[in-house]
Amino acid sequence: MNVAEAARLMRVDTPPVAIASIDIGGYSIDSRTARAGDLFFALRGENHDGHDHVGPALERGAVAAVVEREIAGASPDRQVRVSDSLEALQQLAKNLLIEWGGPIVGVTGSAGKTTTKDLTARVLSAAGPTHKSLGNLNNAYGLPKSVLEMATDGHTPSDYRFCVLEMGMSTPGEIKRLTEIAPPTVGVVTIVAPVHTEFFEDGIEGVAEAKAELIDGLKPGGTAVLNADDPRVARMRDRRDDITALTYGFADTADVRASNLEAEGLSGSRFRVDTPAGSADVHLPLVGRHNVGNALAAIAAGLALDVPLDAAVDALADAEPSTMRGQVVRLANGVTILDDSYNSSPKAFEAMVTALSGIADAKRRIVVAGEMLELGAESSEMHAACGRVVAAAGINLLAGVRGDARTLVDAARDAGMGDRAVFVDTPEGAAEWLAAELRDGDVVLVKGSRGVATDRVVAALVERFGTGGTN
């Protein structure tokens, strides 16, 4: 895509003639990472204004900057004027998808979005080249940037048959806007749980309504892939009569149903899947029952887009966990870390503690629980409930990290863990405590909200002990 083509898709009348025919290598919203050949978008945020960084972006080799006002000191021939830079970014992505015309899968939910997105992309790749969101770029900035990766580094949208996009939210209306940019052919909703509840006056029901914006935004004739095990999600099938609903889960009523589940600890799970297209035995090398649900969602999305069941099952057999979402890290001292440190919420925390408690060959089971953020007025009680879950699961040691994790630790102590549960203020403190406690054969779950940075616990232990154990 050259600058003139990008300007047309952004609905800009006349780009600077001097750069109109220059090919764009990529798209950037951060001058610090802008590369030679990028088109830089000067976006305004609460705490920054990209217009202040146009000069550095151009100095790094960006072909041009999309700006709302002329930037003094920068060549006018390298500035594409628009009324709203964010709107221009979103329009570019939206119109690129319209001209591409392929099937889009949108994935949302209070937990499991990224893993389900990755598994869905893996399933669809069995039927054709598939583009997917980078990491968890799932908001008003990240989603269009992910879409534009289809036209980056020499790629064109025609290189792909399918596109899978994660759609996140923290306030009402966000997913609605994302579906306007990228209207899904298939919409997957994983679960509704108390996440971001501080932004919703009606709590979890408000979260459910916000997640349902994905179903409202489906293309007419599209397919809603819904978790039959979550009543709030299952009810979304009744929101429209011009779409198809395909449910998944462990419930007898699910269209895509798992049965005969056999947990294999750190090696994943085996189960039987029954679908409208037949049945098959599945090996999923991801830890935990909750990941079986994510795999079922991916199978259902594949069926909605005519991926053969046997191809979907074969694709899942080689699945790998998404970064910091259930990754197994083996330390050289014989300890295994279950790194689920990217984010946390009460439901997701409970799921991972259950998974840890089911690892039969662990000599001891240890949990590092970072504070869970954005839970509003119920945060203290939710943390306390999670502490009771840890104690009931027979976890040997617990470290709570920061803030309301103290309440989690206190509840676990009261429920029988006593001094086997400790509280520390920082991830570094948790790593120091662990380093003194760890023994050969221990399995450690590390989980916490992104803002608590529990990934630093994993990094510190890797740096201290090294990797390469065979436990």
Image: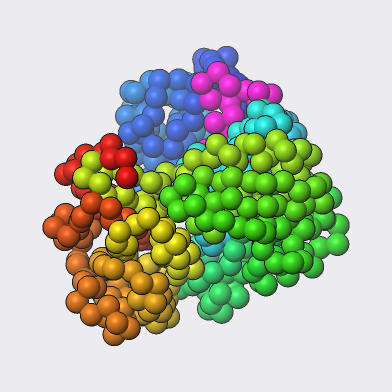
The quadrant in which residue 181 appears is top right
x, y percentage for residue 8?
65, 28
x, y percentage for residue 323?
42, 44
Residue 130 vertical position relative to residue 240 in the rendered view, above or below = above
Query: Which quadrant is home to the C terminus?
Result: top left
Give the magenta-colored segment's residue range.
139-159
Examine the structure image and report whether residue 141 is included in the region drawn in magenta: yes
Q: Residue at x 29, y 68 (%)?
A: 396
Q: Residue at x 33, y 23 (%)?
A: 59
Residue 314 vertical position relative to residue 218 in the rendered view, above or below = above
Query: Which quadrant is home to the N terminus?
Result: top right
User: How was this image coloured?
Assistant: rainbow
Examine the structure image and report whether residue 78 is included in the region drawn in magenta: no
x, y percentage for residue 131?
60, 33
Residue 115 vertical position relative to residue 360 in the rendered view, above or below = above
Residue 202 vertical position relative to residue 255 in the rendered view, above or below = below
On the rendered structure, is 418 left or right of 49? left
Residue 383 visible in the current orientation: no
Count the marks: 0
x, y percentage for residue 329?
33, 44
Residue 235 visible in the current orientation: yes
Q: Which secondary structure class fits the magenta region best?
A: helix
Please state which of residues 51 and 398 is positioned toward the viewer in this rendering: 398
On the rendered structure, is 185 left or right of 385? right
Q: Residue at x 35, y 76 (%)?
A: 391
